[in-house]
Image (cartoon, rainbow, N blue to C red):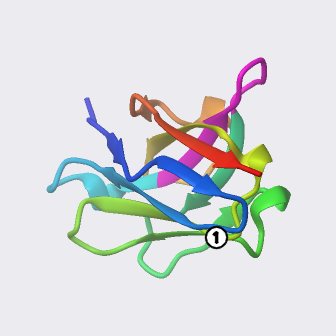
Amino acid sequence: QLQLVESGGGSAQAGGSLRLSCRGPEYTFDNYNMAWFRQAPGKERAFVAAISWVSGGPSYYADFVKGRFTISRRPNKRTAYLQMNNLQPEDTAVYYCEAKFQGNTPTNDAGYDHWGQGIQVTVSP
């Protein structure tokens, strides 16, 4: 089973920035599409961003984070990142790192079969 561990969460004021990290196994990590989802209290888990397993492949973003968040990864670093700029109170949620082996890069939660424990992000007005 692919083990994923999130870090880098915490608190920020509106307009501030945070960077989330997701670490996985060294020898298999580059073969997985990676994605970030989030879940606020009383809400369903929502897609945030995803990046292809292919080197130089495409990235995908939910409309509400375009221009503010950036997903990235580096070869053989077994880490994916989510840079979050211009944070807003509505970004407050638990953020989950998720993974899917090769193939296409889904934007729905059902398309992923590995996930971390989640990390809290809280944004104050």
- Looking at the image, the residue that sits furthest to the right is 63
Task: Name the side, left or right, on which 43 lies relative to 69.
Answer: right
Q: Is residue 52 visible?
A: no
Which residue occupies 63% across, 67% down? 16
Which residue occupies 53% across, 48% down? 11
Circle 1 residue: 85
Task: Name the side, left or right, on which 116 lies relative to 92.
Answer: left
Nearer to us in this view, 25 or 91: 91
Which residue occupies 25% across, 29% down? 1
Q: Residue 119, relative to residue 48: is it above or below?
A: above
Density class for disc 1 (Cα within 10 Å; few <14, some 14-19, many ≥20) is some
Give the image quarter of residue 117: top left
Residue 123 x %, y %: 66, 48
Q: How many marks?
A: 1
Task: Name the side, left or right, on which 123 lies relative to 36.
Answer: right
Which residue occupies 28% across, 36% down? 2
**Which span of residues is magenta-colored?**
34-45
Give the image quarter of residue 115: top left
Secondary structure type for disc 1: loop
Residue 66 x %, y %: 77, 69
Residue 58 x %, y %: 60, 73
- Looking at the image, the residue that sits furthest to the left is 27
